[in-house]
Image: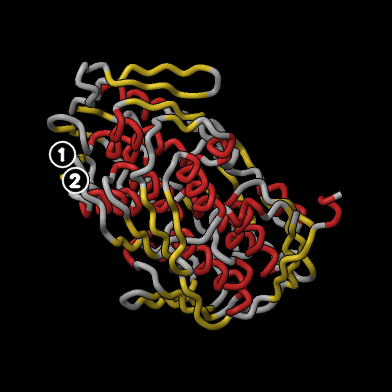
């Protein structure tokens, strides 16, 4: 076990580069299974979740070869089984994309139920409802989902699907399942997130016919095969970019975050400007700098293009240092306020009532030992440590490694006093 030790109170300054999108990567890697030839994935983030997905693909018979620091070549031609019942599947939330990919390739699948961060109930009922609409018999038993095409041809059949909620996971999974289905599939009330569009663009690059990704309605005309043999570069990580933007703001620094897509950050930049944070944009960069005293604001998480739920813990840290009283309302996930108890250990004035946290600004946070409850909350606690007076120790940082590439090294490159050390107490 490892932990971060942070000496806070140092303004961050300089330039930091954003890696490829975690959320796009965990959808694109299973999508390679639909190809009939090897594919090369560029700008792939070197994070735990990506390594777990590659391990799963290799167990299934794919050959995965790192040919550069962020480039992997995947040959799926050796995959002959429609089953993914390994222990590692249950460690990864995004492993549910194997369901759609295997159905699209084989017309059947057996996949262990997914794991990931504990953020309350995150059912996959919309995924299964969509698969059933495509002509798949579904059974869930013994911790796994089993599905097989009803049609005697073994193929899925295009259909009209309406999602009860705009689920990112269900939208991507149904795209994977339907790209080879007979006829046309229309998915309504789709998620619009950038990584949904990125997965669709990857599939189209292999010969799929997907229209409307990024809108409420996606139309897919099934094709008999996907040709593969392509090199595809994953989009920059929207949440990593936002995390560094708030890191600059909480420390009162001046940081230019590079290799991002400013349009993807519009909900965050608007909220930062409302809170009196300096924001300057370029073609592929955003500069965050101190403009004056921070002002409180109210934040409600929403599906894209609204304020992302994955930035909710980070913006809450900024609100603890703002003048006045702000509120954060979580309307996307079931429960995401586990981190507030850790922030209170650092002196934050936060009261949680249901899905709303009321945050009264204070003069400053104090360093303390805290524990990561999940990926984004862990990153938020690191930001709190960077802003705090004194020493902060952040444990259970495996959560952070799931989604951030060399997090502490990137922070050190812009002046943070942070070190990764062995957590001897947790190791005993």
In this view of the protein, which residue sits in the foreground, 333 or 373?
373
Residue that mark 1 sits on: 223
Q: Would you place residue 342 above or below residue 409 in this image? A: above
Q: Which residue is painted at 29% across and 35% down in the image? A: 105
Examine the rendering and report whether any part of residue 316 can be seen. yes
Residue 324 point in image, percent of width and height: 59, 60
Name the residue at the front extreme: 78
Q: CA distance from mark 1 to mark 2?
A: 6 Å
Examine the rendering and report whether any part of residue 326 can be seen. no
Asked whether disc 1 touches disc 2, contact meaning CB atoms under 8 Å apart, the reply is yes
Estimate how packed mark 1 is, as few (under 14), some (14 to 19) or many (20 or more) residues with alpha carbons within 10 Å.
some
Which of the 4 quarters of the picture holds residue 391?
bottom right
Residue 426 point in image, percent of width and height: 82, 50
Residue 107 point in image, percent of width and height: 29, 27
Residue that mark 2 sits on: 208
Answer with left or right where residue 173 lies relative to residue 353.
Answer: left
Answer with left or right where residue 75 lies relative to residue 249.
Answer: left
Q: Which residue is painted at 32% across and 38% down in the image? A: 171
In this view of the protein, which residue sits in the foreground, 252 or 16?
16
Secondary structure under tag 2 reads loop
Q: Which residue is painted at 25% across and 28% down in the image? A: 162
Residue 274 point in image, percent of width and height: 44, 65
């Amino acid at each position: 076990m490892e932990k971060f030790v942070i000496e806070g109170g140092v303004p961050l300054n300089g330039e930091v580069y954003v890696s490829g999108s975690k959320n796009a990567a965990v959808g694109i890697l299973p999508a390679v299974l639909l190809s009939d030839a090897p594919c090369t994935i560029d700008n792939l983030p070197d994070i735990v979740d990506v390594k777990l997905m590659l391990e799963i693909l290799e167990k299934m018979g794919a050959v995965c070869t790192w040919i550069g620091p962020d480039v992997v070549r995947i040959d799926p031609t050796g995959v002959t089984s429609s089953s993914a019942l390994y222990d590692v599947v249950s460690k990864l939330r995004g492993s549910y994309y194997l369901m759609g990919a295997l159905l699209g390739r084989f017309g059947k699948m057996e996949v262990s139920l997914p794991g990931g961060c504990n953020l309350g109930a995150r059912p996959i009922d919309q995924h299964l409802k969509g698969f059933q609409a495509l002509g798949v018999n579904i059974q869930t038993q013994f911790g796994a989902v089993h599905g097989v095409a009803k049609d005697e041809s073994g193929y899925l059949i295009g259909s009209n699907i309406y999602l009860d909620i705009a689920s990112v996971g269900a939208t991507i999974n149904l795209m994977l399942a339907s790209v080879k289905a007979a006829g046309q599939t229309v998915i309504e009330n789709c998620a619009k997130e950038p990584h949904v569009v990125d997965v669709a663009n990857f599939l189209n690059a292999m010969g799929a016919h997907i229209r409307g990704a990024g809108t409420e309605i996606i139309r897919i005309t099934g094709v008999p095969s996907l040709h593969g043999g392509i090199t595809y570069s994953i989009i920059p990580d929207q949440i990593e970019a936002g995390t560094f933007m708030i890191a600059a703001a909480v420390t009162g620094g001046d940081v230019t975050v590079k290799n991002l897509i400013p349009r993807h950050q519009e909900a965050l930049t608007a909220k930062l400007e409302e809170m009196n944070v300096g924001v300057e944009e370029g073609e592929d960069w955003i500069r965050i700098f101190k403009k004056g005293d921070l002002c409180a604001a109210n934040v409600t998480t929403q599906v894209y293009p609204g304020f992302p739920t994955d930035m909710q813990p980070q913006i809450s840290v900024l609100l603890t240092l703002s003048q006045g009283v702000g509120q954060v309302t979580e309307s996307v996930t079931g429960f995401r306020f586990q981190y507030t108890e850790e922030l209170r250990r650092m002196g934050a004035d936060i009261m949680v009532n249901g899905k709303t946290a009321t945050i009264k600004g204070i003069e400053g946070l104090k360093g303390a030992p805290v524990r990561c409850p999940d990926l984004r909350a862990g990153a938020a606690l690191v930001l709190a440590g960077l802003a705090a007076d004194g020493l902060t120790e952040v444990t259970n940082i495996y959560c952070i490694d799931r989604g951030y590439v060399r997090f502490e090294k990137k922070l050190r490159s812009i002046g943070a006093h942070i070190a990764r050390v062995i957590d001897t107490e947790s190791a005993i």
